[in-house]
Image: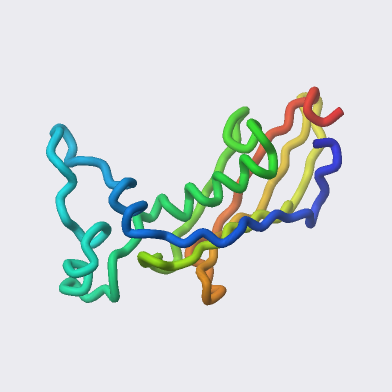
Amino acid sequence: MSNVREGQGWTSSPKRLTLTQLNDFQPPPVGTDAPRSGNFHSDPELARQQGWPTAVAWALMPNAYVEELMLTAFGQFGLSNGAELNLAFTAPVYVDDQLTSHLRIRSVKNGPDGRDVVLDAWCENQHGNRVAIGDARVRLPVDAVR
């Protein structure tokens, strides 16, 4: 990982968000073992009744896709050693949308304990609309940058 540099970037392959993934992502009601109940995240018809075109993804799903790209780019340090990800969700994500995650290094600072890498992070849908925007920070320890 000694070759990280400003401007370097990573892009994931597009991932189609399925209704099965939305249902699997949904936890049961707090404090119960009850089955998952229908809501606008898991029931396209209920979502349409509430004014949405179809089921709406959980906001943390684009977050998880960006985290996956952080692991691809930085290995274990993508989600450990003080790594951070801060995203703002800027548009709804719907069932059957295809999401692509992006990372681009904004800055690299060398320090006595390694490198501090600050990245721009975003996730966009198949229309090129950014549905989540923010930044990430990865700390690469000294032994990872030699």
- Image point 51% across, 59% down: which residue? 15
Is 105 in front, or is 25? 25
Q: Quadrant of residue 96?
A: bottom left
Image-based side of 116 in relation to 12, left or right: right
Q: Position of residue 54 (x, y in %)?
A: 28, 71
Residue 102, image x and y in percent? 63, 58
User: Which residue is pictured at 21% across the width and 62% down the height?
Assistant: 43
Quadrant including the N terminus:
top right
Quarter of the image that includes the C terminus: top right
Please say if 51 is above or below 58: below
- From the viewer's perspective, is residue 21 above or below residue 138? below
Q: Report the side of 37 relative to 95 (left or right).
A: left
x 62%, y 40%: residue: 71
- Coordinates of residue 60 in the picture (x, y in percent): 41, 50
Is 85 rendered above or below residue 80?
Answer: below
**In-front residue for pair 106/101:** 101
- Residue that appears at 80% across and 52% down: 6
Looking at the image, is 31 positioned above or below residue 21?
above
